[in-house]
Amino acid sequence: MTNEIVKLEAPELQGLEKSKAEQIKATFEPMAKMLSEFENQYNELMAIPIEDMTEELTAKYKRLRLDIGKVRIETGKLKDKQKEYIKLEDRAIMGVHNILVWAVKEKEDNLKEREDYFEIQEQKRLDALQLERAEQLSLYVEDAFERNLSAMDNDVWSAYLNTKKKEHEDKIAAEQKAEEDRIAKERAEAEERKRIAAENEKLKKEAEERERWREKREKAEQERKAKEEAERKIREEKERKERAEYEAKIKAEREAREKFEREERAKREKLESELKAKEEAERKAKEEEAARFQAELSKGDEAKVKDLIADLKNLKSKYTFKSAKNQKMYTDVSMLIDKVINHIEK
């Protein structure tokens, strides 16, 4: 690239008076000249192969980028001053400004790329390392590409990867064991269902056979009961007739006997009445005689009677009982003693 001043021939200048166009160009020409002064240095730095980059060179790229950037900054300041002119002039100014900005922007970008070369390379290395590690880790975890893996030291990364691999393998082993257990359980359950089905079929046949025998027995039992019922009815009818005849005979005999007994009882009652009257007369005669005899005897026993009454009264308070049963019994005895005393005193 030659050390040539940027041409400020913006199309927008064509619509202005020549003097105005020249004036605008003259305003920005110092910026174009300033830019051309950095051209050689820019060309020299950009000619260096990217493979030969060093930390010292990145500082030069940065310095030149900042210097060239001043052209863009100063151009902006001039642009702001010139915007006081009419709109046509403003568009012309913006055209010239854009030419300078475009010219500077490309150089700034190229210099920035060289300036950040090692940072970019480091970032590329980290990105590649992140991708490589994420691909390795993705074999064992689902969110490998969402984790920050490039920041780990190699020994940390190796330990981390081995841990996740071990966890993954343990998980797979556990899943395989669980699957084997599930298959074994399903096989055992299938065998059990098969055994139960066979057992149920056997039980069903046995139940059907028992049902046939039950129906056969019930039918025989019903026939036996029907026969016994018919025989019972015949027997009961015969017994009923015999019983009716016997009861009629017994009734006739009972009525005859009752008649005889009534007649005999009337005779006996008459005789008993006569004997009772006789006995009653004799009893009264004996009682009257005994009363007279006792009256005679009682005339000398008055003192003894009084002692007897005193002894009986003493018996009412002589004993004490604890149980309610015996207490009631003693109360009843006392009442009887009172009756005896009353009887004696009459």
Image (spheres, grey):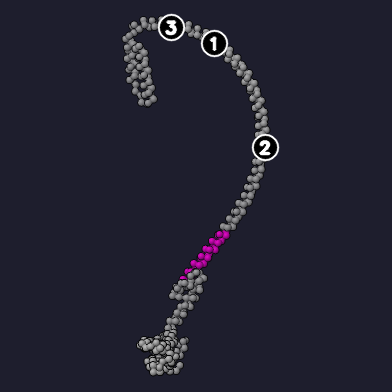
Residue 231 lies left or right of residue 78; in this view the side is right
Q: Alpha-carbon neighbours of circle 3 within 10 Å: few (<14), some, or many (≥20)?
A: few
Q: Nearer the viewer, residue 82 or 153?
A: 82
- Rendered location of residue 329, percent (x, y): 38, 22
Q: What stretch is highlighted in magenta?
A: 160-184
Q: Quadrant of residue 234?
A: top right
Q: Residue at x 32, y 17 (%)?
A: 314
Q: Which of 276 and 152 is in front in this view?
A: 276
Three-letter amino acid code at the position of disc 2: Ala
Q: Is mark 1 on a helix, strand or loop?
A: helix
Q: Which residue is drawn at 37% across and 92% down?
A: 27
Quadrant in the picture for the C terminus: top left
Disc 1 to disc 2, C-alpha distance: 65 Å
Circle 1 residue:
266
Three-letter amino acid code at the position of disc 3: Lys
Q: Is residue 161 magenta?
A: yes
Disc 3 to disc 2, C-alpha distance: 84 Å
Q: Is mark 3 on a helix, strand or loop?
A: helix
Circle 2 residue:
220
Quadrant in the picture for the N terminus: bottom left
Q: Which of 111 and 305 is in front in this view?
A: 111
Counting residues from the start of the chain, the first of labels 3 and 2 encountered is 2
Q: What mark, if any, has residue 284 been given in the picture?
A: 3
Three-letter amino acid code at the position of disc 1: Ala
Q: Which residue is drawn at 48% across and 8% down?
A: 276
Can residue 117 be seen here? The reply is yes
Counting residues from the start of the chain, the first of labels 1 and 2 encountered is 2
Q: Alpha-carbon neighbours of circle 2 within 10 Å: few (<14), some, or many (≥20)?
A: few
Overall secondary structure of the magenta stretch? helix
Q: Quadrant of residue 317?
A: top left
Residue 309 lies left or right of residue 98; in this view the side is left
Counting residues from the start of the chain, the first of labels 3 and 1 encountered is 1
